[in-house]
């Protein structure tokens, strides 16, 4: 029975997670906050992890569906555990705390707090640290536990979420691959922290904002998000939001000095094109809304970076933009950034493939005998991959509509409900006309929490968890 092997792996995850829970506890001690919720959670987590890890099983091999279950259950476990310190320290309900926790780990950034500035330093740190963990935690974990074969097509969707290409394109060893990916991840984060310090941002804020940017999350220690920081700091955050939306394979190619392959990347070209068009659209339509060309341009760059990277930081009220801009922002909110980044959303790679499929189908209608092969990044795309992309798009739309139906039961305006579902399912966190998510019922919060998990884990792992199949 492989279920024991699944829980054995989850136990290993929980043991590692228990040590991460000690970091916000230490941060609290540094600021003379003697709260022990993180310490207690760490103790029970390591105990649970140890008990699960001691399970005896004769099975040693994991199938792809087992890997999906491990990833999904791990996310559920860490989200529930992560909600307890929030619930204890802030005295909010379990549903609200779970919503905040899932929003943190899925790098969404949607919050139920009116004013984060009243929260303790340890909780503020924990909110952005969840972003930092969630940004690469699941995908790196998936690479470590799921066996990869040369002809393994079932890994396609997980590979789309991983911050890099297939494992074999980096190093034959998974550990070396993880070291490389985490080296890039930590390196970019540290560079951003240093630049924000140069820009005059306080040390604590620069660490939190950088972790939120790295995980493309969006939790801020200030009620104004990034609005009160210097122009230089805002520019740095905007730049790094864009950079963390790039496929991490590009940074690996930079390390190899393979610039020719970088300039040939279809995904990078489309991602950059969508970003520049968004900046232009926001800038042109907001010249009369801000004080001068410079402010309009800065807001255009910042908001374009925030929406397309699914980060969710803001420097001004995005509700001031005209309807055409808000519709476009909803579109790029759903599409988001590149596959292999820390972002949520549908992904640019899938969008490119969908348009290529549509183009091929039209050509077949005009020329029935035409044989057209679809390529992406200079390589032939297998029909199985194309079919899974179409299925994913169908499921993506259906699930958004189902969650929207549940949220619609609250009786709030249609635009408010649409914004809430799009921003949570797309793991963005930046929303129109919503003061905070306390305006929704507990049922809607649970539905949107599920949407955040579905969006971040790219649907199929959770579906695999629900499918019972005898071994």
Image: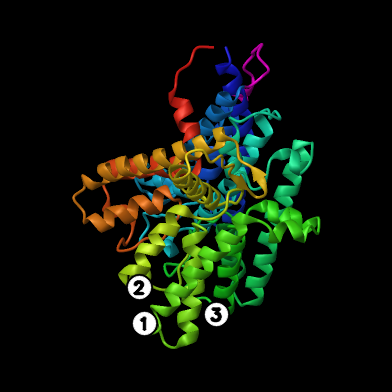
Mark 1 vs 3: CB contact within 8 A: no
Q: What is the C-alpha distance between the residues marked 1 and 2?
A: 8 Å
Find out whether residue 52 is within the magenta segment. yes
Mark 1 vs 2: CB contact within 8 A: yes
Residue 302, position in %: x, y?
Answer: 50, 71
| Depicted 251 relative to depicted 320: above or below | above
Residue 335, position in %: x, y?
Answer: 47, 53
Q: Which residue is mark 2?
A: 321
Name the residue at 52% across, 50% down. 347
Point out which mark residue 231 bears: 3
Name the residue at 23% across, 55% down. 414
Q: Which image quadrant for residue 214?
A: bottom right
Q: Secondary structure at mark 1?
A: loop
In the foreground, 262 or 345:
262
Q: Which residue is mark 1?
A: 289
Find out whether residue 349 is within the magenta segment. no
Q: Residues within 10 Å of mark 2 (few under 14, many from 20)?
A: some
Q: What is the C-alpha distance between the residues marked 2 and 3?
A: 20 Å
């Amino acid at each position: 029975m492989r279920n024991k092997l699944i829980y054995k792996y989850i136990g290993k995850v929980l043991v590692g997670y228990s040590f991460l829970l000690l970091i916000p506890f230490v941060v609290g001690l540094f600021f003379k906050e003697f709260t022990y919720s993180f310490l207690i959670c760490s103790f029970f987590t390591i105990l649970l992890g140890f008990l699960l890890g001691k399970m005896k099983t004769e099975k040693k091999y994991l199938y792809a569906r087992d890997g999906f279950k491990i990833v999904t259950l791990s996310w559920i476990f860490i989200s529930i555990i992560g909600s307890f310190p929030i619930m204890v320290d802030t005295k909010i309900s379990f549903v609200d705390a779970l919503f905040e926790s899932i929003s943190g780990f899925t790098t969404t950034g949607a919050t139920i707090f009116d004013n984060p500035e009243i929260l303790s330093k340890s909780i503020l740190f924990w909110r952005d640290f969840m972003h930092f963990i969630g940004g690469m935690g699941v995908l790196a974990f998936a690479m470590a536990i799921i066996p990869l074969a040369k002809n393994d097509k079932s890994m396609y969707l997980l590979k789309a979420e991983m911050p890099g290409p297939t494992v074999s394109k980096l190093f034959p060893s998974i550990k070396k691959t993880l070291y490389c990916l985490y080296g890039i991840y930590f390196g970019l984060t540290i560079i951003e922290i240093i630049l924000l310090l140069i820009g005059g941002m306080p040390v604590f804020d620069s660490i939190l904002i950088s972790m939120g940017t790295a995980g493309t999350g969006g939790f801020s220690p200030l009620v104004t998000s990034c609005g009160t920081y210097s122009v230089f700091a805002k520019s740095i955050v905007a730049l790094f939001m864009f950079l963390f939306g790039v496929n991490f394979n590009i940074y690996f190619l930079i390390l190899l000095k393979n610039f020719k392959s970088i300039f040939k990347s279809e995904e990078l070209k489309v991602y950059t094109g969508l970003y520049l068009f968004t900046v232009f659209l926001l800038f042109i339509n907001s010249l009369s809304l801000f004080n001068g060309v410079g402010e309009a341009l800065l807001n255009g760059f910042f908001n374009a970076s925030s929406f397309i990277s699914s980060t969710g930081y803001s420097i001004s009220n995005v509700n001031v933009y005209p309807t055409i801009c808000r519709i476009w922002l909803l579109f790029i909110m759903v599409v988001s950034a590149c596959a292999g980044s820390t972002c949520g959303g549908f992904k640019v790679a899938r969008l490119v493939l969908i348009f290529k499929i549509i183009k091929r189908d039209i050509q077949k209608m005009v020329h029935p005998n035409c044989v057209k092969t679809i390529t992406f990044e200079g390589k032939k795309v297998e029909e199985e991959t194309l079919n899974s992309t179409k299925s994913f798009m169908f499921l993506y739309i259906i699930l958004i509509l189902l969650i929207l139906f549940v949220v619609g039961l609250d009786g709030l305006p249609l635009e408010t409900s649409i914004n809430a579902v799009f921003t949570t399912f797309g793991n963005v966190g930046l929303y129109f006309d919503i003061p905070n998510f306390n305006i929704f019922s507990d049922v809607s919060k649970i539905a949107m929490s599920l949407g955040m998990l579905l969006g971040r884990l790219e649907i199929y792992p959770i579906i695999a968890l629900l499918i019972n199949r005898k071994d």
